[in-house]
Image: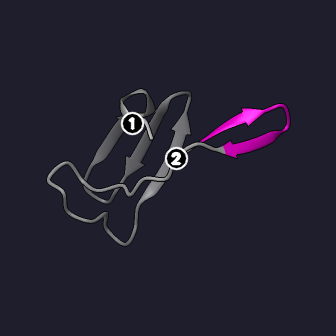
Amino acid sequence: MGELDGEVMRVVGEYQLVLPDGAALPARVTVVGRGPVLHLITAERWYQLSLDAAPAR
């Protein structure tokens, strides 16, 4: 995860994404960020993750 600092992105945390049950993401997943929300789209489901909910590091 990063924050924009002028024209530079500064890394503020690294996380491993997993499915709600803790399983690894499938091999084919599309990830799109819109504002503070990540959208993860698999062949069967569409997940949304609010970056506001990410634990502080």
Asked if residue 11 is positioned above or below residue 43 in the image, the reply reads above
Secondary structure mainly formed by the magenta segment: strand
In the displayed image of the protein, which residue is found farthest to the left?
Answer: 21
Asked if residue 30 is positioned above or below residue 47 in the image, the reply reads below
- What's the residue at 51%, 28% (across, down)? 36
Percent from the top left, x then y, of residue 10?
A: 70, 43
In the rendered image, which quarter contains the N terminus?
A: top right
In the displayed image of the protein, which residue is found farthest to the right?
Answer: 7
Q: Residues within 10 Å of mark 2 (few under 14, many from 20)?
A: few
What is the secondary structure assignment of the residue under circle 1? loop
**Front-most of 45 and 39?**
39
**How far is mark 1 from mark 2, CA to CA?**
9 Å
Q: In terms of image quadrants, where is residue 29?
A: bottom left
Q: Residues within 10 Å of mark 1 (few under 14, many from 20)?
A: few
Residue type for callout 1:
Ala
- Left or right of 41? Residue 5 is right
In the rendered image, which quarter contains the C terminus?
A: top left
- What's the residue at 37%, 72% (across, down)? 27
Q: In terms of image quadrants, where is residue 28?
A: bottom left
What is the secondary structure assignment of the residue under circle 2? loop
Q: Earlier in the sequence, mark 1 or mark 2?
A: 2
Percent from the top left, x then y, of residue 18?
A: 29, 56
Residue type for callout 2:
Gly
Q: Which residues are magenta?
A: 2-10
User: Which label number is shown at residue 40?
Assistant: none
Residue assigned mark 2:
13
Q: Are marks 1 and 2 in contact (CB under 8 Å)?
A: yes
Residue assigned mark 1:
54
Percent from the top left, x then y, of residue 51?
A: 44, 33
**Magenta span includes 38:** no
**Front-most of 57 and 4?**
57
